[in-house]
Image (cartoon, grey):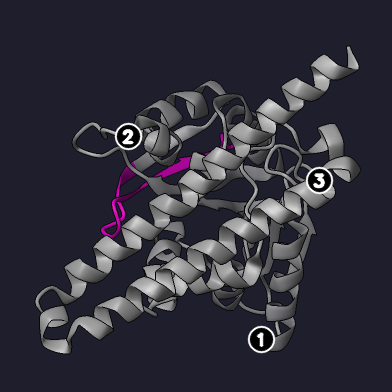
Amino acid sequence: MYSTGRRAGNGQQSRKDFVALAVVVKLSLVAAFLIMLKLGAGYLDAGVWTGALHGLILAVVAAVLFWGSLRHRRSNRGAHGASDRGIGIVLHRAAGYDLLARVLTFGREGSFRDRMLRLACLQSGEAVLDVACGTGTLAIAARRLVGPAGSVAGVDASAEMIDRARSKAIRAGLEIDFANATAQEIPFPDGHFDVVIGTLMLHHLSKPVRSAFFREARRVLKPGGRLLLIDFGRPARQSRMPRLHRHGHVDMDAVGVLLAEDGFKIADSGPVGTMNLNYLRAMTSRGGPA
């Protein structure tokens, strides 16, 4: 029985490693495409060495992200065991994550985050939760928007991401409550937040985990609270490499159905206007969680 369980566990780990590699490959391809689209013929004017340098940077970032994530999982496999199962894809290597974000946004990560936060319609004094907050960039920007009377918290399944987020908040002189926790087990009391935000995280979660996250989001939201979800939309054409892309696109219509089943009222949805991202806004009932 032990041998069979170990083989099954190794097979499951191999699948997770493949999915992690697929994420890195996909992000690298997206970054390369965006750079070519942005600069176009400018590469020809700049010369071959400029294009080669960009390619080398992307390759290094991809290697750092994948190797760091793989090494982290292998070194902690015995310590965490079953506690790591069923929570979705967990990204580690926080410094590499920030570097990749800069590459993907052409160094304009601030304006990219501002565009997403405008969809949250944050008001001064509100309490905000950023789920799967990564290294805290969005949470820090949200903290500035809600002002001294407001509050912001962030949760992420990666302890490394949370450590970096805390360090960044301290350097910014902002008080933010970061916690190492999963989307389906949010460590905050009922009716605590005005707004819950989940950006670029749904495609890392299986459908059962998404449902658990939605139930938790509804629990921690105040009556009439808002949930903002942003993620990659489905491509116009079917990919020829479904194994690489299956996890990376989110059907917001299907998400809306799940949210309605969990007691949310869908407010609106549509394109964010950049990087094939779509958003969905939902609200809890004025009566609060059932």
Residue type for callout 2 = Met
Badge 2, how many Cα within 10 Å: few under 14, some, many 20+? few
Q: Is residue 143 above or below residue 126?
A: below
State the extent of the magenta-drawn residues as a range. Answer: 269-290
- Work out how far the residue at label 2 is from the one at label 1, CA to CA, in angstroms: 42 Å
Question: At 74% across and 79% down in the image, what residue appears?
Answer: 167
- Residue at the spot x=67%, y=43% of the render? 183
Residue 285 in magenta?
Answer: yes
Label 3, residues with CA under 10 Å away: few <14, some 14-19, many ≥20: few
Residue picked out by circle 2: 241
Residue under numbered circle 1: 172
Identify the residue shown where x is 26% and y is 65%. 34
Q: Are marks 3 and 1 in contact (CB under 8 Å)?
A: no
- Which one is in front, 25 or 217? 25
Amino acid carrying label 3: it is Pro
Of residues 181 and 43, the one drawn nearer to the viewer in this rendering: 43
Comparing 20 with 267, the one in front is 20
Name the residue carrying label 3: 189
